[in-house]
Image (cartoon, rainbow, N blue to C red):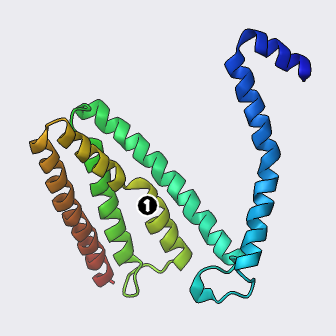
Amino acid sequence: MPGLVRRMSAQDPQLTRAVLARRRLVRLAPLVAAAAALLWRAFVPLTAPAQWGLALPDARTLTLYGWIGVGSALGGMARFWLAGVAARLAGESFPWGTIAINIVGSFVIGFFATLTGPDGRLFVSSTARQFVMVGICGGFTTFSSFSLQTLNLAKDGELVQAAENVGGSVVLCLAAVWAGHAVATSLNLAR
């Protein structure tokens, strides 16, 4: 490896610094993890009350986090795809993709929450509900993107478009969540 570093340094000194920094980081990572574990053990006893939310998670909780993470990844990929489709169809001068994503996500969460709720037609586990509503819908909907795009429209002097983005997103998403709820309620009643 020393020969490799010497050859790279002759070609690109920036690359050499990056390689050396990465090696230092790799050596430090186990130390940082051990220090974090020691601090955790020092400040949070293993028998910490559950209401504190500080106890080490059990296997069931870790599994739930895993499912939510998978759902978030799927939702994020679906968001990326739909935003690309909207940009190709409607252009990128107005955030139509973000509005469409928020409307679809609002409909899905309203529909699924009602259909699988206590009075719902479909029984699913709480893990499945969290997988869809927290994971997929959380990864799919984009209110953080919505906020940034609205701010950028306002900063660019496009105040009317910024107001339309806010009004359209809020009104249409509320309408979509209501529609999802209404459709699932009618399905629940049609037993």
The answer to which quarter of the image holds residue 52 is bottom right
Q: Is residue 90 left or right of residue 38?
A: left
Q: Position of residue 100 (x, y in %)?
A: 27, 49
The foreground one among 144 and 26 is: 26
Local crowd size for mark 1, using a 10 Å CA cut-off: few (<14), some (14–19), many (≥20): many
Residue at 26% of width from left, 32% of height from top?
92
Work out whether 72 lies above or below 109: above
Q: Is residue 81 left or right of residue 34?
A: left
Rendered position, 90 above or below 147? above
Residue type highlighted by circle 1: Gly
Residue at the spot x=30%, y=63% of the render?
107
Give the percent coordinates (x, y) of residue 67.
Answer: 59, 65
- Residue identified by numbered label 1: 138
Q: What percent of the width, then of the height, locates residue 27?
A: 82, 44
Quick one: 19 or 174, which is closer to the camera?
Answer: 19
Identify which residue is drawn at 68% across, 87% down: 48
Q: Nearer the viewer, residue 63 or 13?
A: 13
| Closer-to-camera residue (7/84) | 7
Tell me residue 103's x, y (percent): 27, 56
Residue at image location 33% in from the left, 55% down from the top: 143
Q: Quadrant of the N terminus?
A: top right
